[in-house]
Amino acid sequence: MTTTTWRPLAACLLCGAIAGWTTQGWRKDASIAALQLEAAIQTATAATELAQATARVLTLERAAGAALAQRADHLTQDQTHAKTERDRFNADLRSGAVRLSIPIASGQCPATADTAAAADHRIEARAELDAATAAALDAIAGDGDDATRQLNACIDAYNTVRNTYHVQTE
């Protein structure tokens, strides 16, 4: 092979290699661009889904917060009403409008053959409590009622949150 025939052949091969390399580069660049586009679409889709899920959770949180605030207001109203009733009861005790008494045991043993009619007509011995003792007993009962109201409010709050977020409990 002479240099005159070899040079054009080498030039053709070199041009073919350069063209192939350029074409391969274009295909590679096109593949990379397609992958980047797909990744960008997936990222945008994931960001949209995250934003939607976040909005749903925030909506649930606001609803639960409003329900809990409403329940707290209701508890406050109930406690205020109960305190007003206790204060009225204690004022009636002090004024003598209300009197408290408790049954006292008598020294006699009741007959074992008491009938219902006899039980209705039986007079029970009672001891009247002074106003301070009655007020103390009312305070104890009021504290228990307040605790029961607070526990019921806690149960209601728990159920509100559980139902809002659809939490499964076992």
Image (cartoon, rainbow, N blue to C red):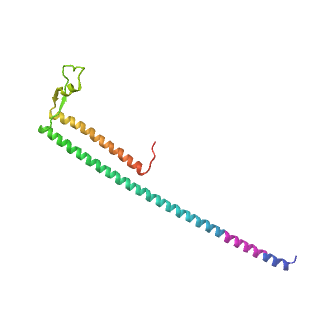
The front one of 24 and 120 is: 120
> Vertical placement of 108 versus 71: above or below?
above
The quadrant in which the N terminus is found is bottom right
Please state if 38 lies on the left or on the right of 158 as rendered: right
Residue closest to the far right: 1
* Image side of residue 9 versus residue 95, left or right: right
Q: Position of residue 18 (x, y in %)?
A: 73, 74
Count of marks overlaid on the render: 0
| Residue 146 location (% of width, % of height) | 27, 41
Tell me if residue 22 is in the magenta stretch.
yes
Vertical arrangement, residue 28 with respect to residue 164, above or below: below
Q: Is residue 104 above or below residue 167?
A: above
Q: Residue at x 29, y 40 (%)?
A: 147
Q: Residue at x 29, y 47 (%)?
A: 75
- Between 38 and 22, the one lying in front of the other is 38
Is 134 magenta? The answer is no
Report the residue at 20% width, 43% height from top: 85
Could you tell me which residue is drawn at 21 percent across and 34 percent down?
A: 137
The residue closer to the viewer here, 125 or 148, is 125
Residue 79 appears left or right of 23: left
In the image, 121 versus 144, the foreground residue is 121
Magenta residues, dominant SS class: helix
Tell me the quarter of the picture where residue 29 sits: bottom right
Residue reaching furthest to the left? 95
Q: In the image, residue 103 lies at what x, y percent?
A: 19, 28
Region rendered in magenta:
13-27
Quick one: which residue is furthest to the bottom in this view?
4
